[in-house]
Amino acid sequence: MVRKIPVFVLLGLLVWAEGIAAQTPETTSSTIAKRIGTVKSVSGSMLTLALSAGPDVAVTVAPTARVLRLAPGEKDLKNAAPIQVQDIQAGDTVRVRGTASQDGTSFNALEVIVITKAAVAAVSDQIKQDWQKRGVGGRVESIDAAAGNVNLAVPGLSGQKTLVVHTGPSTVVYRYAADSPKPEDAKKSSLKEIQPGDQLRARGSRNADGTEITAEEIFAGNFPQFAATVKSVDASAGTLTVQDLATKKTVEVKVTADSQVHKIPAEMAQMFAMRLKGSMPAGMQGGGQRPRTASPGAGQAGSTPAGSGESGETGSGRRNGSPDLQRVLSRLPSSSLADLNLQKGDAVIVLATEGTPSSAHTAITLLSGVEPILQAAPNAGQAMMLTPWSLGGAPAGGDASQ
């Protein structure tokens, strides 16, 4: 199966496509259209094209169409190499120009410009590396829309910092979908849609002391995290109903193939509970309000954690700070909802998508075996260090201290 191009990679390819468009002779027909997408299959002169949004498109390449392949980084069609339709492979990205059917599901191509799958991978890798070098992540504290600034709370080993994210006319803002933490599902948005409490990642140029960043690209979204008790489970449908311990509300949660599902062994949960209890202020161990969103400080499971700019993370915790559960989870085998064998009254911790009034929350991370943790620190949600970016494919960012 060919996956859709991540939106932050597609953005670069769209710039590429529009850059070469000016070199393409136009006809006077008002029906001439363009599409850019990923090739799913090739059969003779037919291509099946997956777009970034919407249904697949069946592309018929005309016998007289010119088919060109650009080398990575090349933008001048004069340097493009003529190829045959049969040279195009699944996974390649193409820009087709021609006429579309009224419903948009079929397309007659007069021109096909190809960038190979290897070149797409190179672009993706380059952008991911840039996120690691120049990215920051945190929780939105406040927004000054008039000035175009966002104040971001960024956790670190020496305590939480406030970082100012500056935006301008060229800053591209995306908002995560209500049912997905994946960047390829994010939609183009604006600064006015960002709200306090959102988790935000920004990529750009930082000042010398790391307290400000001029953002080129922003991803933001709301990802609630809550402790709950199970009310019912339908493992075959991948759904469960839980009661949020903080709000006492009933929440519907859907578990998908992309959800991280783990059962924490009892001994590990006890150890984590003791570390967590020791790191939390006394007032947070037995009462008080728990934040409704997860701290964005942790990184991707199995990789260098975002926020690792300050050295000293060891084992399952952070020196002079709360333990990092994401590091613990990276060592646990994955499970399924059926594997957990959840019963009514069992405790779970859930990191989920925002959801909509008409749809269930989609679980990003679902943890069972957490009773010792919640007994030691009922308000442990503040320090759980779970993030939606623990799933692969999201922009990898870093702590402002890096």
Image: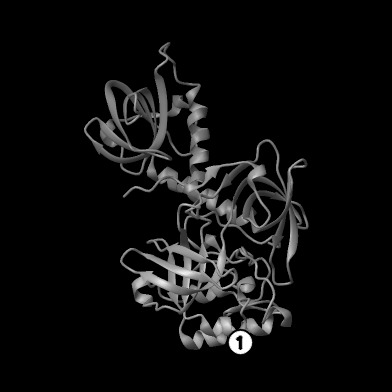
**Residue 322 shows in the view:** yes
Provide the secondary structure element on which disc 1 rests. helix
The correct choice, above or below, for 355 with respect to 116 in the image is below
Against 288, residue 306 (above or below) is above
- The x, y position of residue 78, in whole percent, is 45, 24
The residue depicted at 60 percent of the width and 85 percent of the height is 376
The percent coordinates of residue 129 (x first, y second) are 55, 54
Residue 336 appears in the rendering: no
Query: Taking 60 as reference, is 241 left or right?
Result: right
Residue drawn 44% across and 16% down? 25
Q: How is the image coloured?
A: one colour
Most extreme residue toward the top, as rendered? 28
Q: Please, is residue 378 above or below residue 5 in the view?
A: below
Q: Nearer the viewer, residue 170 or 250?
A: 250
Kind of residue at badge 1: Met
* Residue 153 position by quadrant: bottom right
Q: How many labels, in total?
A: 1
Q: Which residue is mark 1?
A: 274
Q: Quadrant of residue 172?
A: top right
Q: Is residue 207 left or right of residue 262?
A: right
Question: Neighbour class for label 1 at 10 Å: few (<14), some, many (≥20)?
Answer: some
Q: Quadrant of the C terminus?
A: bottom right
Instruction: Judge whether 77 appears above or below 55 on screen.
Output: above
Residue 205: % across, % down: 69, 48
Residue visible at 48% across and 61% down in the picture? 391
Residue 374 point in image, percent of width and height: 57, 81
In the figure, is residue 185 to the left or right of 282?
left
